[in-house]
Image: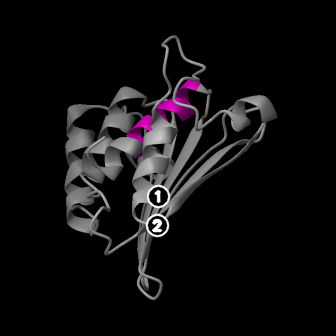
Amino acid sequence: MEDISLHILDIAENSIRADAKTIEIIIARDFEQGLLRIEVIDDGRGMDAATLARVRDPFFTTKHKKTGLGIPFLSQAAELTGGQVTVDSGPGKGTRVTATFHWAHVDRPPIGSMAETILTLIAGHPDREYIYEERAGDRVFRLDTREIKNDIENVPINTPEVLAAIRNMLKEQMKFEM
């Protein structure tokens, strides 16, 4: 995958397949340590110990295909920068995927378009809840689809007008588009 936003989209799609109702995506830049931390947290089915043990195996997948490259590729990308990926999960407890990258490392992939990733998730799966948060120093930007749905009342969140408004808000607020 060319950028981090596509890794996040892949993990979030896995969360949806695991029946997650709420998916939280956090991107945090730690200026003091020079790190970029990505977290994707869901309330889905979670994984048992046997599945969790094989999560980095590219030839293991729970999907109807022969390979599961999402976590292995994310791990490789993080490790190339001196970072790492951890996966915490348990049956009925959901899953937390955390990836760290050294920010200034020449091999760190670009973050890419998180606005498009978030919009893709909202448009394709409007019945789920998404919390997106960016942290950089003292600055925090947070988008919560529960709040948006409350504000728009009976208008579906994936209508073109609402998606356009969300896109504009994301483009104005996001600082990690690179």
Mark 1 falls on what kind of element?
Answer: helix
Residue 106 on image: x %, y %: 27, 68
Say which residue appears at 43% left-offset and 28% top-offset. 125
In which quadrant of the rendered image does the N terminus lie?
A: top left
Mark 2 falls on what kind of element?
Answer: loop
Looking at the image, is 137 positioned above or below residue 61?
below
Q: Is residue 135 left or right of residue 177?
A: right
Furthest-bottom residue in this view? 32
Query: What colour scheme was applied to this rendering of the protein?
Result: one colour
Residue 138 vs residue 79, the one in the foreground: 79
Place residue 6 in its image quadrant: top left
Residue 36 vs residue 67, the one in the foreground: 67
- The residue that label 2 is drawn on is 82
**Do callouts 1 and 2 mark residues in contact (Cβ within 8 Å)?**
yes
Q: Is residue 3 left or right of residue 39?
A: left
Cα distance between the residues tagged 1 and 2? 5 Å
- The residue that label 1 is drawn on is 79
Q: Which residues are magenta?
A: 8-17
Residue 100 magenta-highlighted: no
Residue 146 vs residue 4, the one in the foreground: 4
